[in-house]
Amino acid sequence: MSARLEVVQGDITRERVDAIVNAANERLARGGGVCGAIHAAGGPEIARECATIGHCPTGSAVATTAGDLPARFVIHAVGPVWRGGRSGEADLLAACYRRALEVADEVGARSVAIPAISTGIFGYPLEEATAIAVGTVRRAETAVTVVRFVCFDDATAAAYRRALDRPATGGRGGPDPGPASPG
């Protein structure tokens, strides 16, 4: 089944979906940005469950309760820190999106809100990250029926809309190559 992909600009902590994806760190510790907002809005129950889990490697994801959020679950997906693009970042970013959808399937989530993973403090270039996110989600085999990319600002929402406007490319599992190079 192919999920319907949507782009919205807003506060991910207010999304009424089955699962909200958190742009997490490997320690599953409260951070800044999206992670901090999710922990603050969801309350201490999320942090307690994260502490019990303890660790999640880059490229993977785990689920916890959503605490006080309107969702049922938070899926903590760990994207890579940008190191110039020669350290496997694209594969790790694609893997964390795939794993987030696998975890959504495991917990029975059919609607999922996802932020722009790794594009904040982790420094991943926005255009490349959105191409990978959209391409990976388009190719995912999942029971999720709605994936909503929730963007904090205009620039991020515009990047996701551009990525969604590009035709789907062939291949399975790897990152979407994005737009063709000129010339």
Image: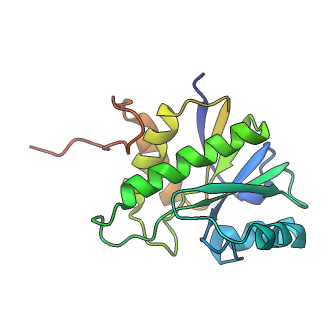
Judge whether 51 appears above or below 85 on screen: below
Q: Can residue 159 be seen in this view?
A: no
Residue 147 as seen in the image, left or right of residue 140? right
As drawn, the residue found furthest toward the top would be 1
Quadrant hosting residue 35: bottom right
* 85 vs 129, nearest the viewer: 85
- Which residue is at 85% across, 48% downward? 72
Q: In this view, does 115 lie above or below 41?
A: above
Quadrant holding the C terminus? top left
Question: Is 17 in front, or is 75?
Answer: 75
Q: Which residue is drawn at 70% across and 37% down?
A: 105
Q: Is residue 77 left or right of residue 157?
A: right
Which residue lies at the image location 28% right of the left edge and 43% below the top edge?
A: 179
Q: Position of residue 137 (x, y in %)?
A: 52, 39
Question: Which of the colour schemes (rainbow, by chain, secondary structure, one colour) is used?
Answer: rainbow
Q: Quadrant of the N terminus?
A: top right
Q: Above or below — where is 1 with respect to 9?
A: above
Asked if residue 63 can be seen in this view, the reply is yes
Looking at the image, residue 88 sits to the left or right of residue 101; the answer is left
Count the numbered circles shown: 0
Residue 113: x percent and y percent?
68, 47
Q: Where is residue 33 in the image (x, y as percent from the top left)?
A: 64, 73
Q: Most extreme residue toward the left, as rendered?
A: 183
Residue occupying image coordinates x 89% and y 61%: 67
